[in-house]
Image (cartoon, grey):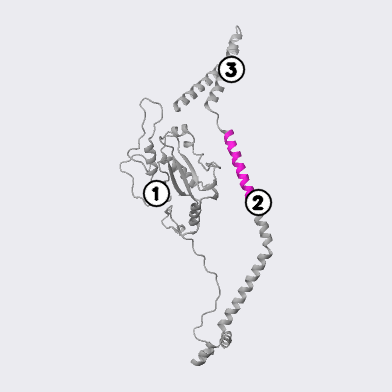
Amino acid sequence: MFSWSKQKGSRRPGIAGDYPGATTHRKAHTIQGSIRPPEFTREQHIDSYFQDAILKKSTRKVSVDDSTYDTVFQTTAGDALILRVYFPPPSSVRPPQMTLVGVKAVHNWLDRSTMRVTGYQSIQNDMAWKHARVLLGQAVREVVTHLQLNPPDIIDVVDPGLAKMQSNLRTGPMNNNTNNNPPAYNTCTTPPTPPPPVVNMPSIPSQFPDELEVKTRDELHEILNNELEFLKLLQSIPVHQEIQLQRDSILDENAKISTSLLERSEEYTLLHGRVTDLKESLSTKLQQFSEWQQQQDEFLKPPASSIVIKELNRVRKEAYRKSEQIAADWTDGNIEEFCKEFIPLRHTMHRRAAKVERLKFQHQQYY
């Protein structure tokens, strides 16, 4: 996990339970005589988030009020991601909304168009959040842990700051972190300078050439003042000749490479056009796939409780009507045949009636 800043603090003593960020006042309030699950206060939810031993170093508030927070983490694939948590004020009844910001990614827990976390059961709706009986810190930690161990496929990084962070993670000195601690969120490193090209330069002479050793001071001054004589002497020095040969060789090689690139410029232009078309096609297909995925989710969504209760009542009445018809038609006959037809229909009717009562009780309990 990353760290927004170096915060001091540790767990408060005397805490029972196995939650790493627990505090002494994190106790659910149960309404006396009520069958509803215990409720946590908003302060307890937020405190569990900021006091979590794993999350607190990488979490910061990004809104003026106490509603929005960012938690940055790194996946096992090496990607840095930011989970934005919106906890609707003013109460703690509504579930938090968690969204990956700054990226476009594909994951079975993420909505493909909004990057909102939809696969975590406890925050899918108000009923699930109330029934889950978990604190905000635990919910965020479970989502972060799942995305760390099952990293999403990153399609594009749209936030410049996050893109720079991704680059630093792959090329900067943070990869040489020997204590296995993740870098701070606001850490910025300079990418390493590429090594200079290898040029086989001739060795530096340890002494002056013989042509200069035998000349007097006046002769050397005369050569320096005479450009033609100076160039003539320079051409006769072996080191200078070797450098000129290497220079000519490099110029020839550069000319060949430039000519080759110019000859293939049309091919590269066509290839660039094909890549651009494929990218646009992929974007269109991803958008269409996202729409179809949303339609599929809508089709596969379980029906509302009211619809189920209405259908159960219909088939219950149908079973009752058939059993009453059998009882009315039977006056005198084989009792065993009558029981074989009458009793199964009555059983079916009572089972369906029990299901209706159970659904109504659950609906009243959570609403």
75 or 229: nearer the eye? 229
Q: Is residue 285 magenta?
A: yes
Task: State which region is magenta.
Answer: 276-299
Question: Which residue bears the numbered disc 3?
Answer: 318
Q: Is residue 359 above or below residue 149?
A: above
Q: Secondary structure at mark 2?
A: helix
- The x, y position of residue 318, in whole percent, is 58, 17
Question: Which residue bears the numbered disc 1?
Answer: 57
Residue 277, disc = 2
Q: Secondary structure at mark 3?
A: helix
Seen from this angle, which residue lies furthest top? 332
| Residue at the spot 42% in from the left edge and 48% down from the top edge | 58
- The x, y position of residue 245, in whole percent, is 60, 79
| Residue at the spot 53% in from the left edge and 21% down from the top edge | 352
- The x, y position of residue 189, in whole percent, is 45, 59
Q: Secondary structure at mark 1?
A: helix
Instruction: Give the CA distance from mark 2 to mark 3.
Output: 60 Å
Upstream in sequence: badge 2 or badge 3 = 2
